[in-house]
Amino acid sequence: QVQLVESGGGLVQTGDSLRLSCAASRSNFNFNSMGWFRQAAGKQRELVATITTGGSTNYADSVKGRFTISRDNNTKNLVYLQMNSLKPEDTAVYYCNAMVLGRSPYWGQGTQVTVSS
């Protein structure tokens, strides 16, 4: 069994930056992709950004140009989400996600990001 552990959430003001981290409990596990989703109160969970093992990235339109997903160069299965120019509408619980073809997705426990106006 593999666990995903997120860190880096918090309370910030509009325009501030935060960096989220997600680490898998097994560094030798081969995920096809890792990424971030978020769920605001009363809304469905939505994709924020993903990155494949080959380095291809995908972003939600709402975060393009502000958020950057990356993988750690030295530690396998460690990904970051750099969030700049945060807006109140970015407020949500952010979940780390990891995918293996043919298997159910893996999820972290979530980390709260709150952006005050």
Image (tube, helix red, strand yellow):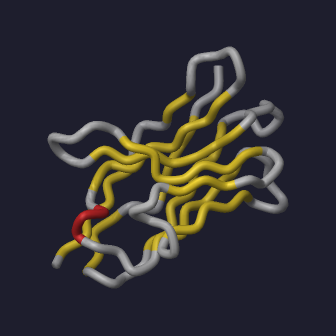
Numbered marks: total: 0
Image: 49 above or below 2: below
Quadrant position of residue 69: bottom right
Name the residue at 64% across, 43% down: 34
Image: 31 above or below 67: above
**Where does residue 60 sit, x and y in percent of width and height?**
47, 55
Please tell me which residue lies in front, 109 or 95: 95
Name the residue at 79% across, 45% down: 53
Quarter placement of the C terminus? bottom left
Q: Is residue 111 left or right of 101 when viewed as pictured?
A: left
Image: 58 above or below 43: below
Name the residue at 63% across, 47% down: 23
Quarter placement of the N terminus? top right
Q: Is residue 14 left or right of 16 when viewed as pictured?
A: left
Q: Is residue 94 left or right of 97 when viewed as pictured?
A: left
Please tell me which residue lies in front, 62 or 1: 62
Quadrant position of residue 42: top left
Please tell me which residue lies in front, 111 or 116: 116
Q: Is residue 43 left or right of 62 when viewed as pictured?
A: left
Name the residue at 32% across, 60% down: 113
**Where does residue 111 sit, x and y in percent of width and height?**
38, 50
Q: Residue at the far bottom: name it.
A: 15
**Where does residue 41 sit, x and y in percent of width and height?**
18, 45
**Where does residue 116 sit, x and y in percent of width and height?**
19, 74
Please tell me which residue lies in front, 24 or 116: 116
Quadrant position of residue 47: top left
